[in-house]
Amino acid sequence: MRLTLRTLLAYLDDTLDPAQAANIGHQLAENPDALILADRIRKVTRRRGLSTPPSTGTASDPNTVANYLSDTLTGEPLHEFEKTCLESDPHLAEVAACHQILTLLLSDQMRVPPTAYRRMYGLVKGRESIPGRKPGDAIPVGGIMEPTRGDLDDSDAPFLLGMTTGDGKGGNVLLRWGLAVALAVGFVLAVVMVWPKKGAEVAQSPTPLPPSPSESRPTEPRPKKEMPPPVDEPKVPAEPFQPMPPPAELPADPPPMPPVPPMPPVPPVEPKNPLLDLVPAKTPVRPGRFAVAKLDAGEPPLLSRKADGDTWTTVTGEANTVFTSDRVVCVPGVKVKVKTAGGQVLLWGNVPELQPIPVLDTTVTFHDPYQGYEADFTLHVGRVYLTATKPTGAKFRVRFQNEIWDVTAKDDKSEVVVQVDHVASPGADESPTTYAACHVNSGTAAFRSRQTDAPKVATGEGLFWTSNGAGLMGPQKPDAKTARQASAYYSRTAIAPNADAAKAMLTAIEEASKRLAAAATVPAAISELIQNESPAAPCLGVYTAAAIGEFGPVADALNDPNRYLVRQAGRVAARELVALPGGDDFFKAAAKKLRLDEDGAKLLAAGLRGLTDQQKKSAEIIDLLVKKLEADEVAVRDLAFELLVFQIDPTARNNKALFPFDAAAPAVDRASTVTAWKAHAITLKKKGQ
C-alpha cells in the first residue's frame, strides 16, 4: 500500500487493518515530509478561525470531495485534488474533518428517540407505515404530516431507549388498568384481615387445666416427722483489729527514662513507570571540570568556552585538552576526532556548498562518563559519528533536550551517526521543531532509550525522533531506494551540488583553520574571514559567527550591499539562529543594528521563519511585501522578494517582468520590476479571496 494523502487520513483515523496500518506506519516514519503533513493535519482540524474553502474550483465541489473519500476519484482529477489540499489549509481541513466524521458515523450505531421514530412513520399511511415491512422497488413514499402534539417531544425522550412515553396511547392500557385494580383489591383485603374485631379489647381469663390423675385420687395424711433440737456451736473469739501499714514514700525526683533512639527515616518510594525503566529520565550529569580527551597532532581546531564564561578559545594540537562542562564547537566545514580509551567521537561540521543539508556547526558539551561508557555528552546541534577502537565495541551516551540515548557500536567495524537539528516554525506563537536521528552506517549497533530497547540494529537501519510528531520511531529497515538515499545523506563525504563552489570552500576551510589556530582572539579571526576578498571565505566567516552566537556579523551580512553570496550566507546562518534557543534575542539585535521600523522588523521575522498558509493569502501581507521592495535596507528588500517568489507565487520565477530582482541595484534599475509586482499584487489578492 502506497503512502498517499488518502491512506494517511485512514491511518490517522484508525480505519486500516493491522497489516496495512503497520505498513503505512513504517512508510510514515521513513518520510519526514509525511510526518510534517500528519502533524499539519492535526493542527488545521483544530485551528480556530480557519476560513472555509472558496466556492469556486473543482476541489470545492462536494461531489468531488465525496468521490475522493469513497475512493472513486482517479487519474488527473485525483492528483489535482490532492495537490490543492496540500497547498491549502482550508481544503485539507475540510477533507480531514469529513473523513473523521464519516469514520465516526460508520463505526458507531445511531440511536433514534422513540418520539422521532413514531413521527417519521406517522408521515405516511397504509401498508407503507408498517415499521418492519420491506418496501418494494417502486412503491412511492409520501403523505401529509398530521398535526403533532407539543408534549410528545419531551426532554426525556432520548433516554427512553425504545420504551413508550406513558402518554396513554400505548397498546397495553387495559393491562395497566387491570393491574391497578388488582393491586387496590389486594390492599383492601389485607386491611380487612388485620383490622381488630368488635369487643376484642376485653381480655378473657385463660381456661383452667383439668386436674391430673394423681390429684383426683383421695390421699391419706402423712405423719409428721419430729426435727431434733438445735445444737449450740462454741463461740470463737474474734481477732483484734490490725490497722493498715502506711504507704512507702516515693522519691521526690523519679529516675530519668533512658533515651529512645529515633526511628530511621523511611525513604520515599517513587512510583515506577515501565517506560522510564530502560534509561532513567533524570540521570544527572557528573559535576566538575575534568579532562576528557586530547586532540591528536594535526587535527583542526575546536572552539571552547567555559560553562560560566563568555570568551571563546581555540583548542588545537596534542597539547590542548577537551574538558567536561565546556561548550565545544566544531566550526562549519571542519571535522575533528575526539578519541577516548576505547572509542572515538567525530565532530562533523558542514556548509551548504559541500552538502545541502540542515547542518552547519556541531556543538556539544562533554560530561564525566559513568562506568562502562566511553563518552557521555549533550549534542546541542549538529552531527557526530561514533566508532569503537576495540573489537569488544564501545558504548556512548547521547543527550539532547530531555532525551537520553545509549548507543553501542558492537565492534571496531561498526559506525553509528547521530544528528540533531532544529527548524523554525512559521509564526511567532509556535516553537521550533527538533529532529533527531540515529543511523547505522556499517556493522551492528545497539540502541536504548526510555521508550525503546533495540539490542540489534543492522546496517542501513535507523531510528527517528521529532518534538512535534509521534516521538521515537524505529528501528526501521528502508527499501532499496530509501536505503541509497539514507546512505548518501549520512555519508561523511561531501555531495557538492557545484564542484567549483565546493573546491573554493574547501580551500577557505583549510585557511580558516590556520587563522583560528594562530589568531589572538576568535572574533578577530572571524572578522578577517568576513573581510577576505575571496568568494568563499566571507561566507565561512558568517557561518562561524552564527556557530558561536555572534549576532552582529550575521546581521551585517544580511545587509551587505555589494556581495550577494554573503547576503545568502547571512540568511542561512540567521535561520539557524532563530531555530535555536534565544532566537528572539537575535531578532531584537538584528532589528536594532539594521535600524528597522516596525514593518521592517515584522518582515525580517517572516522572512527568516517563513509564512503560514493563512499569511500567504493575506492581502495585508502581500501589500507589505510589495511595499518593502522599495525599502531603504537591502536586507528587507532581499527578504521581501524572496518571500514573494518562493512562498507567495512560485510561478513568478517564470515571468521575466517579475524575476529576477537585484535588491542591491540602484532604485532606477529596480523600478520596472517593482511596478510589475504592484500590478501583479492585485491579481494575487483576488486569487486569495
Image (cartoon, grey):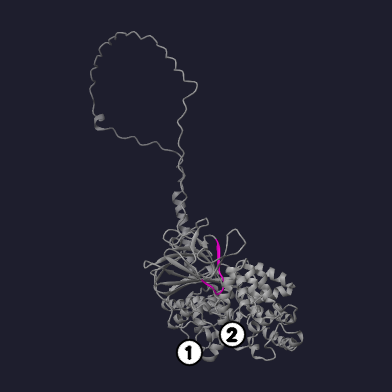
In the image, is residue 308 above or below residue 100?
above
Q: Nearer the viewer, residue 320 or 181?
A: 320
Crowding at mark 1 (Cα within 10 Å: few <14, some 14-19, many 20+): few
Percent of width and height locating residue 109: 48, 74
User: In which quarter of the view is residue 341 placed?
Assistant: bottom left
Q: Which mark is residue 84?
A: 2
| Res 348 seen here | no
Q: Nearer the viewer, residue 596 or 520?
A: 520
Left or right of residue 47: residue 140 = left
The amino acid pointed to by label 1 is Asp
Residue carrying label 1: 137
Circle 2 sits in a helix, a strand or a loop, which is it? Answer: helix
Percent of width and height locating residue 575: 62, 74
Q: Which residues are magenta?
A: 326-335
Percent of width and height locating residue 107: 48, 76
The amino acid pointed to by label 2 is Thr
Decide which of tag 1 and tag 2 comes sooner along the chain.
2
Left or right of residue 172: residue 622 = right
For this orientation, the residue located farthest to the right is 668
Left or right of residue 63: residue 176 = left
